Image (cartoon, helix red, strand yellow):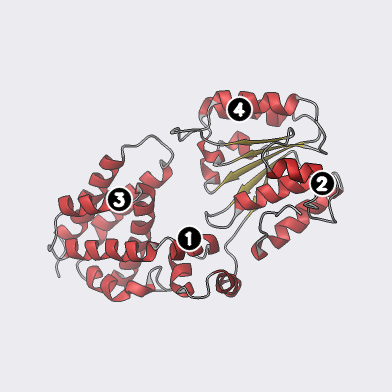
Amino acid sequence: MIALPESYPWHSAQWARYARRAQEATLPHALLLSGPAGLGKLNFAYRFARFLLCDAPKEITACGRCRGCHLLSVGNHADFLHTAPEGDSRQIKIDQIRALSHFVSLSRDSGRYKVVLISNADTINRNAANSLLKTLEEPPPFSVILLITAWAASLPATLLSRCQRIEFRCPARAMALEWLATKAPDIDAETCLALARGAPLTALACSRDDLLSARRALFSDIQRLAEARDTPVKVAERWRQYAPEMIVGWLLSWLADVVKLKSNVTLGGLNNPDVAQGLQAVARRLDLVASFALYDLLIGYRRMQHAPLNPQLVLEDTLIALTGIFNVAKP
């Protein structure tokens, strides 16, 4: 029997609803899978594509034995197409969408549907979005397009209006901790989950990739900058090993904590409870007005994460702004 993609307990409600709609032939032609990263939206989409293309589904799941399941598992199903940014590009371009439109216009080979999966749908550029809109407005029968994004607000309103959204949210803390215990019983699940802002797959990746140690080292560098025991140039040398988007995410998490502590507001707890003592020390040196300017800069970088930015310039600008939030602060 062919191994099927893993099902996650926090997907159960969405899965039951849309699998039933597929059985009842009332499935929308375009589904937008949206929600924070680290919830397994791509996994859900693959499972759903396999279910739609299975020749002999068992109730609301693929059989894992038929020709359709086999072809999809080896990446050779004629009725399935996966579209994503290619190579070094951070965008989905118009040629890819034209190929997608041609694909769905073809007759089905053997499956019940023709299925298209679009990863990182928020990276579709303007021309490609306009081209995709034409396909969404006049979808061929028995075609299903699954768009996946963690940034639905970045998609054009015209595309959003043509899709039915499947919203994914972080599971209850107890469910997430129980799942993590089955996958990695020896990790500090509480800390990893807090760092991941409740996203179980992100929490698991943090534990496996030793990101906790890297993050603590980065936070230690920030404390050294706050106390004028290090320089932005030296810190930049150490930070070059990390992806800019990872640094931005960590800094936003850290900044939210120190602003809370500076304002004596800790409602909902800290994002980084394992480094609370260091956060408190930094918060005493924080200038709130300058910290909000840093926050705006980081949010701007996050919104442009798929744009062709220069990583070195992002790092330098970030460190200059970061140093600035301590320059006028008093211990």
What is the x, y in percent for residue 45?
66, 48
Left or right, 14 with reference to 319: right
- CA separation, marks 4 and 2? 30 Å
- Name the residue tied to disc 3: 241
In this view, the mark in front (2 or 3): 2
Residue nearer the viewer, 162 or 200: 200
Under mark 1, the amino acid is: Ala
Q: Is residue 279 above or below residue 70?
A: below
In this view, the mark in front (4 or 3): 3
- Name the residue tied to disc 4: 97
What is the x, y in percent for residue 174?
58, 75
Task: Name the residue at 30% across, 50% down.
Answer: 241
Q: Is residue 36 above or below residue 173?
A: above
Disc on res. 205: 1
- CA separation, marks 2 and 3? 45 Å
Q: Please tell me which of labels 4 and 2 falls first in the chain.
A: 2
Per the image, label 4 sits on a secondary structure element best described as: helix
Residue farthest along the front direction in this orientation: 1
Q: Please tell me which of labels 4 and 3 falls first in the chain.
A: 4
Q: Quadrant of residue 90?
A: top left
In this view, the mark in front (4 or 2): 2
What is the x, y in percent for residue 328?
14, 59
Asked if marks 2 and 1 touch (Cβ < 8 Å), the reply is no
What is the x, y in percent for residue 116?
68, 37
- CA separation, marks 2 and 1? 33 Å
Per the image, label 2 sits on a secondary structure element best described as: loop
- Name the residue tied to disc 2: 66
- CA separation, marks 1 and 4? 32 Å
